[in-house]
Amino acid sequence: MEVLALEGRKHQVVAKERLSIELCLRQILAEEISAPHDVPAFNNAAVDGYAYSGAEAEQAGGELPVTGRITASQVPLQELGGAGAVRVFTGALLPPHCDRVAMQEECRREGDSVRLPGKLKAGANCRYAGEDLRKGECVFGAGQRLGPIEIASLASLGQGKVLVRNKLRVALLTSGAE
């Protein structure tokens, strides 16, 4: 009965500690976690293929010269001009003049040029900076229980340590009196 009498009373807040995320499985966050940067951080290709300007492709009849190649880990050393198609791979930075990406399976490479598929909508196969998360956006609120998915998300955001509530220690004492 004494336990039931405590119900509804305000209790002291549990102490907090900052732990490495590897130790946080089943812990409870004691702070809000906000995105430290946009996710993705830059405009990039969602598929392997050719990035290009839809207006330029329409003027050229659907065939453009291939003017460059960008891999996912590469930062172009020179500015890629506003003309032609650029061979890109999933995760590659999109050149500023490109507004869509045609999947490689839908294109036909002919020497130094590429035949592009029919009309693709602007933004097709593109991922834009901040599309998933904006810098400063709340990712997890205080009180969030941390499981494997949450810990992986924290790691992907560069959060090595987080503030969590100390685990509660509870004991049940019985007196034997009925």
Image (spheres, rainbow, N blue to C red):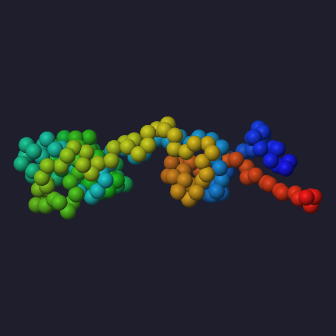
* Up-down relation of residue 64 to residue 9 (above or below): below
Q: Residue at point 26% right, 54% down?
A: 88
Total labels: the figure holds 0
User: x%, y% of residue 173?
Assistant: 87, 57
Q: Is residue 76 left or right of residue 174?
A: left
User: Residue 178 falls in which quadrant of the image?
Assistant: bottom right
User: x%, y% of residue 114?
Assistant: 13, 56
Q: Can residue 36 be seen here?
A: no
Q: Can residue 9 be seen here?
A: yes
Q: Residue at point 20% right, 62% down?
A: 105
Q: Residue at point 56% right, 55% down?
A: 151
Camera-side residue of 40 and 27? 27
User: x%, y% of residue 59?
Assistant: 7, 43
Q: Is residue 164 left or right of residue 15?
A: left
Q: In the displayed orientation, state which residue is furthest to the bottom.
A: 105
Q: Residue at point 21% right, 43% down?
A: 122
Camera-side residue of 14 and 125? 14
User: x%, y% of residue 128?
Assistant: 34, 44
Camera-side residue of 70 and 77? 70
